[in-house]
Amino acid sequence: MVPWESMQELLDDVIVSMTKRMAGIDMERTSAGCPPDEGTVSALITEITGTDGFTLVYHADNALLLEIAQKMKRRPVEDADEVGEYTREYFNIICGHMISQLNRREKSSLRFSMPRYLPSPFDKTEKDQNAFVLHYQTPKGPAEIQGIYTNK
Amino acid sequence: MSIKLMVVDDSKFVYNEMEFFLEGTEFELVRYCKSGEEAIEAYKELKPDLITMDIILPRMDGFECAKEILSLNPNAKIIFISSLAYDDTIEEAKEMGCNDFLFKPIEQDSLLEVLTKASQKADGGEEA
């Protein structure tokens, strides 16, 4: 099993550096969460499989995701579908970097699924357990990333 | 004379970046393909000088697509672009005979360096 501390450290580093690189946005770690409000928060989700198995869920304020999409596109986005398209790629790149580095460091063989975009908060079930949560604040609103063990 | 480049990626982000980074250079974006199947047909039609290829594509992945294009022309110049930096992925790309590998998000300097290097490699022979 991959040590959670190692994963969190890498994930934090990759999210902050990649968000800056792709969208020019500074992300600051905080203790406050991203309120799971319908209508203001969306989710990006991927499934991690291999030597360990869990779900990574990235919740972010819609204003933040819109800004990320527009910066990546280098022009205004047309609609919610475009926000989804660009932010899925954004999260795809983050996951690619994180998993690649983690596999090298921990000699694991983790893989991740193509992220999906949900224009609403991810609905955890009662059986789902949080392995970790990292909270962030940005000039465009909050974000958080959770690692969730799913008991199927 | 411009160097013709075909981009194969199901994400518009990469295409947008290419358009932006290559404006005003000798590299001309002649086609953007969102799938391997589309790329194979486009290759037969256009015979671009260079191809950038994502690895994760719908249905046919980038490796399968590259193999198909290389069977049409063993001298086709293919550069893989991916967010995946798995060692076995890079190894597989090298064994296949790809010209180079770039990691997303791409940077202008690295892109130009890799494209220039690939375009300067001599063509060995005719299409199969």
Image: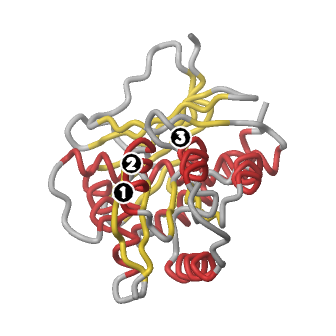
Amino acid carrying mark 2 in the image: Glu
Q: Say if labels 2 and 3 share a chain.
A: yes
Give how far apart the Cα atoms at labels 1 and 3 are: 20 Å
- Tell if the residue under mark 1 belongs to the same chain as the one under mark 2: yes
Residue B61, numbered label: 3
User: Dividing the image into 4 quarters, which one contains the N terminus of chain B?
Assistant: bottom left
Q: Residue at x 39, y 70 (%)?
A: B17
Dot 2 corresponds to which residue? B41
Residue at the limit of the structure toward the right, as seen here: A107
Density class for disc 2 (Cα within 10 Å; few <14, some 14-19, many ≥20) is few
Secondary structure category for the residue under label 1: helix
Q: Nearer the viewer, mark 2 or mark 3?
A: 2
The reply to whether dot 1 and dot 2 touch (C-beta < 8 Å) is: yes
Q: Residues within 10 Å of mark 1 (few under 14, many from 20)?
A: few
Q: Is residue B67 left or right of residue B90?
A: left
User: Residue sitting at 57 percent across and 35 percent down?
Assistant: A147
Q: Which chain contains the residue that carries disc 3? A: B
Q: Nearer the viewer, residue B45 or B106?
A: B45
